[in-house]
Amino acid sequence: MSLKEVAFKPIGVIHSEHALEEKTPIQSVFAEKSLGLAEIFPEYADGLVDIEDFSHLYVIYHLHKVNSARLLVKPFLQDQEHGIFATRAPWRPNAIGLSIVELVKRSGNVLHIKGVDILDGTPILDIKPYSARFDHIQAKRSGWMEEVDDATANMRGKREYAS
């Protein structure tokens, strides 16, 4: 088997209130009041047919501000190093981000979304509908994240602390 380089072409762009990485909520659960737009480029607009029937969407995007990958990182929620694949930190070998957002409404090729933890100007790679029937799983383990209490997660997730 031959592995080749993979390239993606953006299908759209995120418009959000988040201009600075260090002030952007860490996960969409900490951005519940943050509104934004997912502008899908006109050539992909037909792919949005029936999307308004879903309440939530997965947005897959390119972490375009990440300059270098790291294999060991201190995640936002803890001051201890972990392997990048055991975290949701952005400094990944392939700078791909994933967020679950609420779909408020569709206006043509623009999706009005809520719970946006994505930087303004971020290129969108794909959108998939969230399905409670297929995507909701009861996790048995959450690794080191179980060590972080709710108050700390809430404070750090909303970036309400001095790092």
Image (cartoon, grey):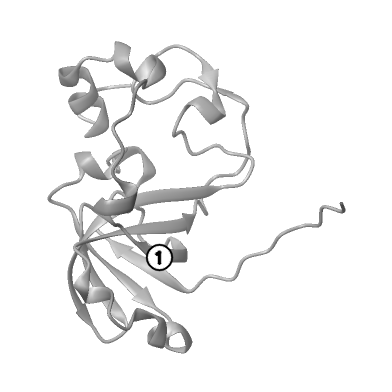
Q: Are there few (<14), some (14-19), or many (20+) residues within 10 Å of tag 1?
A: many
Q: Residue at x 60, y 44 (%)?
A: 67
Q: Nearer the viewer, residue 159 or 134?
A: 134
Q: Going by the image, does 21 lie left or right of 156? A: right
How far across and down, in percent of the image, does residue 100 sit? 30, 51
Quarter of the picture containing the C terminus is: top left
Q: Going by the image, does 70 lie left or right of 62? A: right
How far across and down, in percent of the image, does residue 92 sit? 58, 38
Q: Nearer the viewer, residue 123 or 160?
A: 123
Q: Residue at x 77, y 57 (%)?
A: 5
Which residue is denoted by mark 1 in the rendering? 127
Q: Nearer the viewer, residue 119 or 154?
A: 154
Furthest-left residue in view? 33
63, above or below 104, in the image: above
Q: Is residue 18 visible?
A: no
50, above or below 67, in the image: below
Q: Residue at x 26, y 55 (%)?
A: 101
How far across and down, in percent of the image, does residue 62 sit? 51, 56
Q: Going by the image, does 108 lie left or right of 1? A: left
How far across and down, in percent of the image, does residue 37 sit? 27, 69
The amino acid marked with disc number 1 is Ile
Furthest-right residue in view? 2
17, above or below 42, in the image: above
Q: Secondary structure at mark 1?
A: strand
